[in-house]
Amino acid sequence: MTAHNNSEPSDWVRKWASLVKPGGEVLDLACGEGRHSIFMADLGHKVLATDHDEEKLAVLRGIKNINTLLIDLEKDGLSFKEKRFSAIIVTNYLYRPFLTSLMKILDQSGVIIYETFSQGNESFGKPSNKSYLLEHHELLDVFRKKLYVVSFEQGRINLPKPAVIQRICAITYHAAYNDHILLNQVKG
């Protein structure tokens, strides 16, 4: 998993980006400096980059295929009304109240690519507050109820820095069983 201040996209996001339908709109939640927004825009996706930090979002303004939204997810919630996304990317961020809401804003062929810190990370520094650390299998337990889990990992990593993480890639059942392109990519 790549550090939040690194300009390179996470290996996990790179690995599963091909599951996003061509030209599909991507929601990058708590995007920080926008490394995943830029990566997905470069792949030809329209991206909605959200964060609570105006300065970080300002860097993304004017980049082709990226729109920004200043939002404090913990105060404002996920208020996208009828909007649906082809993919939702979340890295290095956890706010439990919106986890189940993410599935409601996926389109019928949607993909969730999520990775963040897990219990045990307190041994390596921040985050160390339990509110920001996933419990054992938490991402798996949340998403497998409504989505097809393509891949799930948890445990210690050493690069780019020692940490304990969880990561999941999950797709809608429609994508898994009806969209032959996605199904073939999952198998391949």
Image (cartoon, rainbow, N blue to C red):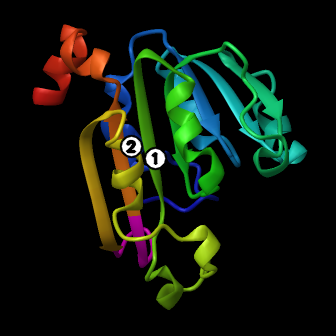
Res. 97 visible in picture: yes
Decide: is 135 above or below 11: below
Residue 175: % across, % down:
29, 17
Whether the residues at callouts 2 and 1 have beta carbons within 8 Å, the answer is: yes
Q: What separation in Å lies between label 2 and label 1 (alpha carbons)? A: 10 Å
**Mark nearer the N terminus (2 vs 1):** 1
Q: Residue at x 58, y 16 (%)?
A: 84
Residue 136, quarter of picture: bottom left
Location of mark 2 (residue): 143
Q: Nearer the viewer, residue 120 or 144?
A: 144
Res. 127 visible in picture: no
Whether residue 151 sits left or right of residue 4 in the image: it is left
Whether residue 48 sits left or right of residue 172 in the image: it is right
Q: Residue furthest bottom?
A: 123
Question: Bounds of the magenta span?
Answer: 157-165
Location of mark 1 (residue): 114
Q: Residue at x 45, y 71 (%)?
A: 118
Count of number-bearing discs: 2
Residue 8: % across, % down:
51, 48
Q: Residue furthest right?
A: 54
- For label 1, count other residues whose C-alpha is less than 10 Å away and answer few (under 14), some (14-19) or many (20+): many
